[in-house]
Image (spheres, rainbow, N blue to C red):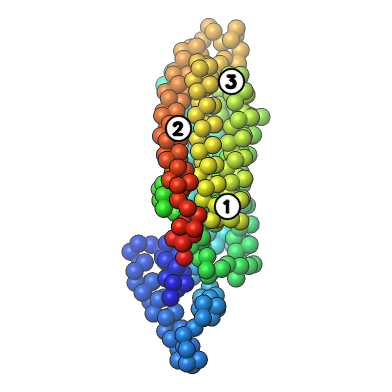
Amino acid sequence: MELVARYLETVGSYLPAAQKDDIIKELSENIRSEIEDKEVELGRPLTEAEQEAVLKQHGHPLLVAGRYRQDQRSVAFGRQWIGPVLFPFYIKVLSFNLGISFSVTFIVFVVLFAAGQAITFSDAVFALSLQLIIQFAVVTVLFSLLDKHLAKFPDRWDPRKSRELKYPKFIEAIPSMRTAWIPRLESASQMIASAVFLAWLRAAQKSPHLIFGTAVGIFRLAPIWHQIYAPSVLIILIAIVQGGINLLRPDWVRLGTAARLAMSSITFVVVYFLIRAREWVVLANPNGNVAGNYPHVLEIINQTVFYSLLFVGLIGIVQILRESWRLVRILQTPRNVSRASDR
C-alpha cells in the first residue's frame, strides 16, 4: 500500500511533532480498515485506482491535517479570509517579509540615534506601522486568494503525487539533497514572498520615506542603488518564474536548483559592485548639512552598510558552492533513478 504510505507521510509533514505519531496511527488504522472492508466485499485486493478513490474520500492532505491540528487560528474580517490550513504558512511568509523591512528601518533609526540625531517615539512608530500595513495588506490578499482556491477546488490533487504536497521545508531549513520533488505549497509561498518583496522594493525606490523615515530630507540613497535596481528585480523575477513553473511541474528539481544557483550568482555580483561603490547613503543637501553632525551620522551609516554587505557576500559564496554541489549531484543522477525514488 505504497499510496497509503505516501498519503500518511504527507499528512504527517503538516502535524506538530508531539501529536504526529498518535494522529498518523489513528488515521492509518481508519484508512487500512476501510480498504480491508472493501477487499472483503469484493473478494480481491483493491487496484491502485480503487485505493486512490479511498484516499480521495478522506480528503486533501492539507485539509485532513488541518482538521487534526489543535491550532485553529485564522484571519477573519467579517468573514474568514485565511483558514487554519494555510494560517501557519501565512504567518511565516508575513514574518519573513516584515523581518526584512523592519531590519532596514530599525538599523537606520539606531544609527541615527547613536549619532545624536533627534528621533522621537512617534517617528519610529509611524515608520514601522507603515511597513506593517503594506506587508500585511499584500500578503493577506495573496494568501486569501490561495485559501479561496483550495476551498473551491479541494479535490484537485492526485494521490499518486501526494508527496508533492508535503510541507515546504524551505520555511524551516535547507531542503534535503535527496528531494525528488518540490512541494507545491513551497512554490506558492515562494511566489507570494517574492511578489511582496518586489512590490516593497518598487515602493521604496519611489518613496525613500519607507527607508529613512523622518530623515528622508537629510539622507538619500547613493546612485549605485539605482544602478543595481534592474538586476535586483531580475533576481526576484527568477524566483517568481521558478516558483510558478515548479507549481505546475514539481518534479523539475533541476530547474529549482539551477534557478537558486542563478539567483545566488547574480546576488553575489550585485553585492560585489555595491561593495566597490564605497558609498551607499549620501546627504540630500551636502552644502546645507555639512555644518551639522550629519557627516558623522553618514559615516556610521555607510560603515554599517559596508559590514552588512560583507556578511551578505560571504553568505552568497556559501550558497553558490552549496547549489553548485547540489546541481552536480542531480545532473549525475539518472532521471529514471530520481523518478523511481518517488514511487
Mark 1, residue position = 246
Q: Is residue 283 left or right of residue 174?
A: right
Report how far apart the C-alphas of labels 2 and 3 lie in the structure: 20 Å
Q: Position of residue 219 (x, y in %)?
A: 57, 19
Q: What kind of residue is marked 2?
A: Gly
Of 215 and 170, the residue lying toward us: 170
Q: Is residue 325 left or right of residue 238?
A: left
Q: Position of residue 338 (x, y in %)?
A: 47, 56
Which is more N-terminal, label 3 or label 2? 3
Tell me if I can see residue 258 in this picture.
Answer: yes
Which SS class for mark 3? helix
Q: Position of residue 111 (x, y in %)?
A: 45, 23
Mark 2, residue position = 316
Of 141 and 36, the residue lying toward us: 36
Q: Nearer the viewer, mark 3 or mark 1?
A: 1
Residue pictured at 62% horizontal, 24% vertical? 226
Report how far apart the C-alphas of labels 3 and 1 lie in the structure: 33 Å
Residue pictured at 52% horizontal, 26% vertical? 269
Which SS class for mark 1? helix
What is the crowding at mark 2: few (fewer than 14 residues within 10 Å), some, or many (at least 20)? many
Tell me: residue 59, above or below residue 298: below
Q: Tags 3 and 1 in contact by the CB under 8 Å rule? A: no
Tell me: residue 286, above or below residue 342: above
Disc number for residue 224: 3
Tell me if I can see residue 298 in this picture.
Answer: no
Q: What kind of residue is marked 3?
A: Ile
**Residue 131's quadrant in the figure?**
top right
Q: What kind of residue is marked 1?
A: Asn
